[in-house]
Image (spheres, rainbow, N blue to C red):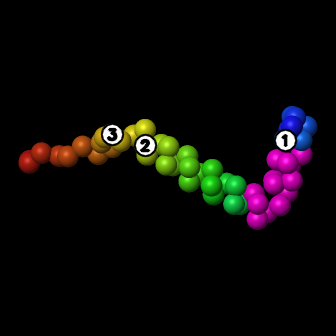
Amino acid sequence: MLNTANLLCIARGIYHNEFQWTLSKSYAFFFTGVLLAKKLVGLELMPAVGPA
């Protein structure tokens, strides 16, 4: 079973390995973007402008 010390050791290992850190950040940002896109369905950032 993983305890807090083991998780911290794993996190430090990933942080100090440049490849693993970059891969972890890429996955994290991708899934954050997917979740954000799902939450913002139907939101109009720039509403349509009517005829002038």
Mark 2 or 3 closer to N-term?
2
Q: Residues within 10 Å of mark 2 (few under 14, many from 20)?
A: few
Q: In percent of the image, x 33 and y 40: which residue is there?
A: 43
Vertical position of residue 1 compared to residue 51: above or below: above
Q: Residues within 10 Å of mark 1 (few under 14, many from 20)?
A: few
Mark 2 or 1 closer to N-term?
1
Q: Which residue is mark 2?
A: 38
Q: Residues within 10 Å of mark 3 (few under 14, many from 20)?
A: few
* Secondary structure character of the magenta stretch overall: helix
Measure the C-alpha gap from mark 2 to mark 1.
30 Å
Q: Quadrant of residue 23?
A: bottom right
> Nearer the viewer's eye, disc 1 or disc 3?
1
Q: Which residue is mark 3?
A: 43
Residue 18 percent across, percent down from the top left: 79, 63
Q: In percent of the image, x 86 and y 38: which residue is there?
A: 2
Q: Nearer the viewer, residue 22 or 48?
A: 22
Q: Secondary structure at mark 3?
A: loop
Q: Residue furthest top?
A: 4
Q: In percent of the image, x 62 and y 55: which residue is there?
A: 27
Label 3 near label 2: C-beta < 8 Å? no
Q: Residue furthest front?
A: 1
Where are the magenta residues, as a range? Answer: 8-21
> Nearer the viewer's eye, disc 2 or disc 3?
2
Q: Secondary structure at mark 2?
A: helix
For residue 8, side relative to residue 51 (left or right): right
Q: Which residue is mark 1?
A: 7
Mark 1 or 3 closer to N-term?
1
